[in-house]
Amino acid sequence: MTAQKKSCVSRLFSLAITLGFLGGAGYILWHFLGKPEPKELWDDIQDIDFGDVLKNLTDLDFHDGWLNDPFLSSNATNEWKNGKDNNGLSLTLLNALDENWQEEYEAAVEDWENGNPDALTLTTKRVSVDRDACKKTEQTGGVMMVCNENFGESGWLGINVVAKVGGYIISSVAQMNEFYLFNADIYERQYTMCHEIGHGFGLPHTDESFNNIDLGNCMDYTRTPKNNLHPDESNYARLAGLYGVVGRRRYLKGSSNTGHPRHIRYSSKFHEVYNSAMADLNEELSKAETTRKNGWRILHRHSKGATYSRELVPGISVEVNMLLAPDS
């Protein structure tokens, strides 16, 4: 059975269960009310003032409801150190993608750049395609690198790896796995690009349930990527909460908040420890175990994603957000 047919059968099964539940609840309520005739029920419904009911909803903050979504394994954000002036985050993205990914990259960056509220000032620097560096997930201090490579049957479509010092992001790498995505449709590719770049800004998922309506943003897990191709107001609001809103400095040349903190220099020792840790993670991914090993912790694992964390040395850690391939 194809993945599409499986998804269709799953949705029909979920619908049948829901209808059965509603029917049973309706019967119990009808019995509890004394088995009234249909006309009696209609007369009672007409006497209800729904305006008063809806009026009580005006003070509810649905955005806060999403932040406390029970379907989220972890809803904690990460945060860039150079966004702490509360004037928005200014960040450089290294575009190390080949020509086949430029359309998806440009669309995703434009979406994230033009949020409302606007918390991001993004600058793209086109760099040479270095597949070896992408495969090693090489980190460059103060920037996010976006690249593509065939990582083989790893089980994941895309990942974002952030390095953190003192709890703050100091660099990020977003990777697209062409083993699954090279021949994927534009929707799957665009969704994955938007999703992984979003993690690079520090955002968590907005929802991890596949049995509810798609929220329409690319940080929401979905079986139908074309419904969740772009960020939405909830993602932009979360970023504004982290970094503030872009102000005058966005238009001033020579701003100190350039996305390149000069004090960050990765030593050869850091790269040695980091490369060893990533090699250990790749080994872990080939196993079905979910226990801590080689210093890696599985923060959570879902049918469509997983988050891993490892402390490299005291105060310096790496966190990996992974978007899993269907049926992985």
Image: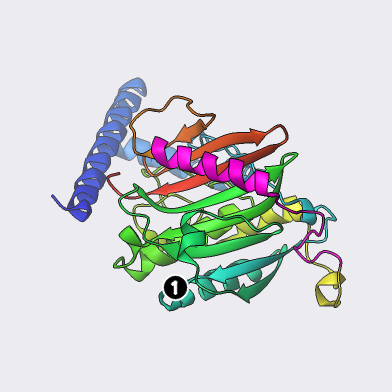
User: Is residue 37 part of the magenta span, yes or no?
Assistant: no
How far across and how far down the image is residue 119, in percent?
A: 72, 62
User: For mark 1, what is the residue?
Assistant: 101
Does residue 223 sit above or below 226 in this rendering?
above
Q: Is residue 61 left or right of residue 29?
A: right
Which residue corresponds to the image point at 73% horizontal and 35% vertical from the top-left?
315
Which residue corresponds to the image point at 57% horizontal and 61% vertical from the top-left?
232
User: Is residue 277 part of the magenta span, yes or no?
Assistant: yes
Does residue 26 sit above or below 303 in this rendering?
above
List the single residue furthest toward the left.
Answer: 1
| Image quadrant occupied by the C terminus | top left
Give the camera-side residue of 135 and 161: 135
Mark 1 is surrounded, within 10 Å at the Cα level, by few (under 14), some (14 to 19) or many (20 or more) other residues, namely: some
- Looking at the rendering, the stretch of residues picked out in magenta corresponds to 256-284
How far across and how far down the image is residue 151, in percent?
A: 37, 55
In the rendered view, how is the structure colored?
rainbow
Does residue 265 sit above or below 127 in this rendering?
above
Q: How many numbered circles are shown?
A: 1
List the single residue furthest toward the front.
Answer: 268
Instruction: Note whether residue 8 is visible.
Output: yes
Give the camera-side residue of 293 and 82: 293
Instruction: Note whether residue 238 is visible.
Output: no
SS at circle 1: helix
Residue 24, picture quadrant: top left
How far across and how far down the image is residue 70, in percent?
A: 51, 33
Which residue corresponds to the image point at 58% horizontal and 35% vertical from the top-left?
310
How far across and how far down the image is residue 196, in percent?
A: 51, 56
Give the camera-side residue of 122 and 10: 122
The residue type indicated by label 1 comes to Trp
